Every structure is written in structure tokens, then in C-alpha cells.
Amino acid sequence: MAEITAALVKQLRDRTNAGMMDCRKALQDAGGDLDKAAVLLRERGIAKADKRAGRETSNGLVESYLHRTSDDFPPQIGVLVEVDCETDFVAKGDDMKKLARELAMHIAAANPRWVQKEDVPAEVLERERELYRRKAEQDGRPQAAWERIVEGQERKFYEENVLLEQFWVREPKTPIKDLIAQTVATVQENVNVRRFSRFSIKEG
């Protein structure tokens, strides 16, 4: 088995934001393979997040981000995001601050419309689904395949418009919900995004 050095543990921690002990254990289980260890941490983080999902989050923080194209030009995009957790101790910690900052920057870049899938109005989703059905029909796809096509397009719609389903702009293979799960695994508390607002001069 490869030696699990402190440098390797730090490299995995910098990459995943997981705790030092979790990183060491994942590296041991992955035989020192950094990529496999990152996958293990992601899976374990999601499992821990699922267990804590129902717990009340009555603390948290609001993070802001202003995007400038250059130092001598005023900001053109601004974001406010509320990220909640269970205790004020965690709310004041670096892990929550780092997550909130990353989320604010991601929202500025990716421009989601809703926080989670459940926030998408039913009429919007049904309109999208109807458009997908019509396109499948116009493209001459067999009727038996329409529902499968609609489901695939619906999943893509969520990935483009729903924050938790989007892929992190800094690490395009990681969904935002997994990024949050990694913080849950680190702070050992339920963490969720309650709301956000994005302002853009260009988009009105």
C-alpha cells in the first residue's frame, strides 16, 4: 500500500474541503489513489448529508459577492445568498464561510433560477415537458421513446436552472448539492441554502 503522507492528506483536503481524519481514512481505503479517495469522500459526504437533512437549521450566514471585470470598472453582477446550519458555532466557522463564498461566486457565474427542484413552479415544468414532447414528435422520434426523451431533457433543465442540480463552475464534475454535502461531512451539521438573489446590470 502507498504511504499516506501528510502532504497527500493535505492535497486531498484542499481538493475536497473534507476533514483531515476523513481524508486520511479515504486515502487508506483507496490505497493512496487521490482520485479514488476523492470519490469515496464524495459518496460518504452525501450519505452523511442525507442522514442530517431533516435537522433544523436555525443559524447561518448571508454572503455577498460583487463581480468586477476590471479594477477600474464598477461591479456589473452582485449576489446575496443565505446558507443555514444548526449552530452559531458552525455559522462562524471557516468551513461555512468558504462554502457560502463559493456558492455566491457560483451563482454569479451560473445564474440559477431556483434553489432546489421543488421550487420550480408546476406550470413552468409542465410547459417545458410539453415543449420537449413536441420537439420529439417534430423530430420524428418514435412515440414509445417520447417519455424517455422528456425525462432526459427535464434532467438537463434542472441542471441548467436549479442551483443544487448545477455543476460547480470551479469543478464541473461536482454538483452543487455534493459540494454542500462535503461541508456537511466536515462540520457534522445539516447545511442548506435557503435563498439567494442575483443582480445583473446587463440582464435588467
Image (spheres, rainbow, N blue to C red):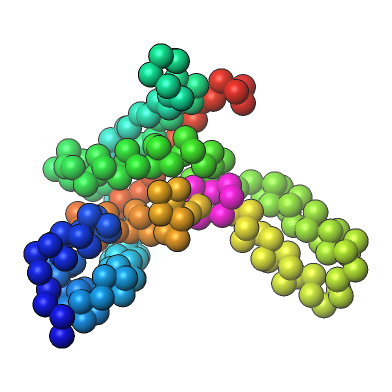
- Is 204 one of the magenta-colored residues? no
x and y, in percent, of residue 34 in the image = 26, 70
x and y, in percent, of residue 21 in the image = 12, 66
Highlighted magenta segment, given as a residue range: 159-165
Q: Is residue 50 above or below residue 57?
A: below
- Is 164 one of the magenta-colored residues? yes
For the N terminus, the image quarter is bottom left
The image quadrant that residue 184 belongs to is bottom left
Q: Residue furthest left?
A: 6
Residue ID at (39%, 37%): 104
Q: Residue furthest bottom?
A: 1
> Left or right: where does residue 126 sit relative to residue 181?
right
30 or 112: nearer the viewer = 30
Residue ID at (84%, 59%): 135
Q: Is residue 68 above or below residue 1?
A: above
x and y, in percent, of residue 133 in the image = 81, 61
Residue ID at (73%, 52%): 128
Which secondary structure class fits the magenta region best? helix
For the C terminus, the image quarter is top right
x and y, in percent, of residue 166 in the image = 50, 52
